[in-house]
Each structure stands twice: as structure tokens, then as C-alpha cells.
Amino acid sequence: MKVMNGSRALGGVAAGLLAALTLSMGGGELRDLSDRVPREVGAFAAAGEDRTYDRKTLYDYMNGGAEVYLAFDFREVWTRPYADPGGRELALDVYDMGSPAEAFGVFSCDREDPEAGIGQASEYGFGLLRFWQGKFFVTVTASDEGEDVDEVILELGREVVKHLGPPGDGPDMLAFLPADGLRPDRTSYFHSSINLNNRFFVSSENILRLDRAADCVFAEYETGTEEEAFLLLVRYPDDGKAGSARGSFLAAYAPEAGEEGLARTEDGTWVFASRTGRFLAVVFQSPSPEWARRLVSSLRLPEK
Amino acid sequence: MNRSVTRRDFLKGTTSALLGASLAFGRERESAAKTRVVLVRRRDVLDEDSRIDADVLQDMLDEAAARLLDQPDGASAFRTLVKPGETVGIKTNVWSYLPTPPELEAAIKRRLVDAGIEAEKIGLDDHTVRTNPLFVNATSLINVRPCRTHYLAGMSGCLKNYIMFAESQEALHPDSCADLGAVFKLPQVRGKTRLNILCVLTPQFHGRGPHHFSRRYVWSYKGLLVGRDPVAVDAVGLRLIMAKRREVLGKAQELPPVPKHIQLADTRHGIGTSDPEAIELVKLGWDEDILI
């Protein structure tokens, strides 16, 4: 064992405390997780090196999924593989998404399973645990299923969340949505047309002119009929961009819509595009013009 | 800007035509002008645990190749594709969640040897095809991979399988990988692809999770799609994916993100046909739950 002199040892303790404090505040280095997350959970043990990938190297880690994260303010991901003596594998991924809103966003775009009670929101099913906490988004993925594996995955998630710091606030735009009929667990937040089309296909081209500067919430509403309706609310950087996006959308999607931006579509429902300042609201599959107008007028948009 | 395919095209029922994935494919339609794609299925190729019967799979490949090329058997069919003395690269796919089955790679290799290709002159590679001497020197290529959805490109099929030949894969990602067809015009590839095999033994029709893979969205279809034209093969593969999505996820999610690269490989890059009216789909074997 190396012997450190007093000042170096003190410096090391101080550095460790600082690292712990920073991580607990939600702004720390993901690499610190290597020392904190248990290397053994149930019959599973860490199997291989911990690794981190950033925006430039994420493609080295995943093929077919990197764009999901790059469409957000993804900073880096820390990964650790686990295996049990029988060769079953788990993969733990902790993503630093830059802010709690972005962490909520990547979580929200892909929800299908029941709540697992971990972090600020979570879901678990078929060997996949997903949750978010503060600016972190976490997944635990299993190569095989089974009740014992389910329990290990959930236990690992409960261990990890202890080291991710306090909760953070989700996107402010969630508060703009009318509450009546809203299905909160189906609301998504994102920036890119890639995310929109994976959530709800609109167009093969980026007719809404979405990019990283645009904030979007996509929400599902019960309508009192068998079919739900969908609301896309976009906040553009300025009024002009919102206006031109509305024009682009209507030209491509509903050229017959009049000045009001209302058109009946082939399934007998209605699409409605309305701009207020730098916000653009688009209602899809509305049961009637009145229903769409009422939903948009119920938006609680800020003054500026 | 290209003509957008929108949700309303889908509601009108014109999406499939726009994407080159029409329902209009017919069984055993005869037309010399059409691009032939063969779908072969066998119930017994997979057991209950999805283990592959290699002999059955070999029979499927032989049957499909023979029918595709109007030859009496698989060995004869492969002899029309390659000549003795050639170097042949089998462009496979090693994606860990759903790789090209080794049994299929072996079946292809066996028929190439039968056709007179020396075993040491057959390359099998994915990520290092740009530098692998067997691919650098290849005079013929066989393109084989499983069929699955892709978060960005919509579908990963025979067209996307060649992205490893590109100097920069990232450069092909913009606009939903619209220009994947351009890879087929690279010097290392142009004019060399003899056969495209889209493995639909266990296709993936929807993606989730960090790597866009979940076993719940893979099903035992027990088939192979085989053709000379990668665009036509992918157009049929897309139709299959859409049909399964409609069945399981509902009409509203029939489309994955639009795989525009399939249509553009035809209309922009001219490397094949995505026009459903110009594709002859030949169906062989087991037809239960065939979907297309």
C-alpha cells in the first residue's frame, strides 16, 4: 500500500467529499458511480469494465438507438455489464441528460409498462427498467427474463437511484396543458421530428421545422368517444418561427384548411393548427371542430 | 423538399404505394418485366425455443435461390451468380441482439463452395468490410441480414446493411438515413452484389429501450426474403413489418418512422425498384399467418 503524506491525504479526502457533494447535487461526474454502485446484486456481479461514452462516441455503444439521446441535451452515459454464473447478463446504463427536463424527456418518449416505484417516474416490463431522477435517466436491461432476474433488476435500480441526487423539475410546458381528459402517463417531451414520428407519425419531412431550439410536448386526451385525440404544443424561439412552421405544416398536411387552420381528415376527425405568439398548438384526431377549439383555448400559456 | 408522406396519406391508404410497400403483391404473378422477390417459409425451421434447424434452413435458401433464378436447385442457382476463381464477400450483420444466424451464413458459404469458390476466398464480415482484404478484393458480394425496425431509418434491411462500406456512417444519418442507396454506388460495392437475403426468421417489428430492442417485439415468422434487387427486397420487408405492426400495435402505429431511404434508393439513386407494381413477389412454402 502506498503511504501518502498528511496534506495529500487530506486533499484526497476533501476531493472525495467534493465529488460526493457534487454528485449528490446532481451535477457530478458519472464516473463516480463506479465507486458507489454495488458490484454485486443478488447472483449477478459486475462483468467487465465500466465505460463512459459521450456525444461523439455514443455510436460506439449503440447501433440504432443513439439518435434517441442525441436529439436531447445528452452529455454522457456510464455503463456497467453484470452477469450471473449461468451466463445471464444485465446492462446498467446511467445517462447524464444535462437537466431534469431533458431526463424526463427521454424517459417520456417511450413509456409502455407499469410504474416500478423508482426515482421520479419509472416503468418495468419484460426485463427492461427505465426511470429518471434529477438530470439522470437510467435503464437496466436483461438478456433473459425470470422472476429472480426481475427482482435483481429492481434492486439494482433502487441502489443506483440513491446516488443520483435530489429530484428535479420536469419541463415547464407540462403545466400549460389542460388537465381535463389528459392522460399524464402518455405525455412526452422532446425537440426533434425523429421523436415525434416515433411517438406519433406526422410526416416523412420535417414540416413542423422542429430542431433543438424547439420544445415540444405531445399529449393524449380522452374525448368521450372511443378514440383519443392528440395535442402537440411547440414552443419556438420566436413568433416568426412559430408562424412559418404553422404555414409549412398546413401547406403539407392540410392545404385545404382555411385561415383558421382547421380541416377534416380522411378518418372523419379534425386537425387544427393554431398559433399564439411563439407557441404552435396542433390538435390531431379531434372529434369535432368545437372540441379542438376548446382544447386549444384551454391551454394555460404564459404571457410571454 | 421531397413530396412529404404524411399521416393523411396513411389515412387515405396511399402510404404503402408511396413507400413502395403496397398490398398489391400477387402470388406467383408472371411477368418478365417485374423484379422478382422470393419469400420462402417453413414451419419447422425453428423449434419452440427458436433454435434453427440448419438443414431446413439450407433447403429454404436453395428453394428460394432456385425459384428466383429459374434454376433446378440451389447449387445451380449459385453457379449463375458467381464463377470459380472469384473472391466473394458475404456482408453479414453482427448486431448482438439480432445477428444474422450463423446457420444462414454457413448455408450461403456452402453453396458458394459448391459453385467453385475456394473457401479461403470467401469473406464473412460486418464492421471491417472497408479494410478486410477479402472484401477489398471481392468481385462479388452477398448481402445478408435480419429484418428489423430502426429508430432513425425506420427499417434496417438490405440497404442499411451496406452502411459499413461508407467512409462515414454518421454522414448517412441525416434526414432519416435518406441516402443509404448512395452506398451501393461506391467503387467497392458498385455492380458487385449478386444476392440479397433479408432474414425474416424472427423479424423485429418495433423497438424499445436503450438499444431499440425488446424480445416482446420479435416474432417467429420463419421466412427468408431473397432477391437480386436490394430495394425490392426491402420494400417487401417493410410491407411485412407494417402488417405485423398493424396486427399487434394497431392501425395508428402501422408505420415505423418512415423508411424513406427505400423509395429514394429507387427514385434518387436508381439502384433498384421500390414500385410495388414492378415487383413480383413469389411465395413458397408455409403460408399460415403470412401477413403479405
Image: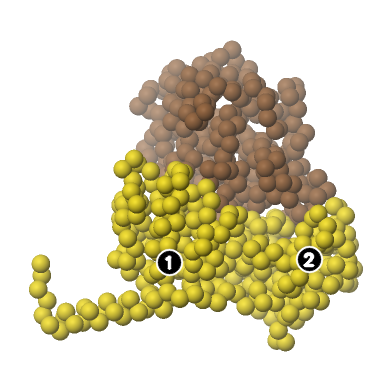
* Image side of residue A263 versus residue A201, left or right: right
**Residue at the extreme top of the image, as rendered:** B72
Query: How many neighbours does mark 1 have within 10 angstroms: few (below 14), some (14-19), or many (20 or more)?
Result: many
* Image side of residue B66 versus residue A156, left or right: right
Instruction: Please determine whether, in this image, residue B62 is positioned above or below residue A56.
Output: above
**Residue at coordinates 69% horizontally, 64% vertically from top-left?**
A183
Q: Which amino acid does label 2 sit on?
A: Val
Instruction: Please determine whether, in this image, residue B276 is positioned above or below residue A147.
Output: above
Q: Residues under labels 2 and 1: Cα distance?
A: 37 Å
**Residue at coordinates 31% horizontally, 64% vertically from top-left?**
A34
Please tell me whether mark 2 or mark 1 is closer to you in this view: 1
Q: Where is residue A57 in the image (x, y as percent from the top left)?
A: 42, 60
What shade does chain A have? yellow
- Dividing the picture into quadrants, the one containing residue A255 is bottom right
Q: Mark 1 points at which residue?
A: A161
Chain ID of residue with mark 1: A
Q: Among the chains, which one is brown? A: B
Q: Name the residue under label 2.
A: A283
Number of numbered discs: 2
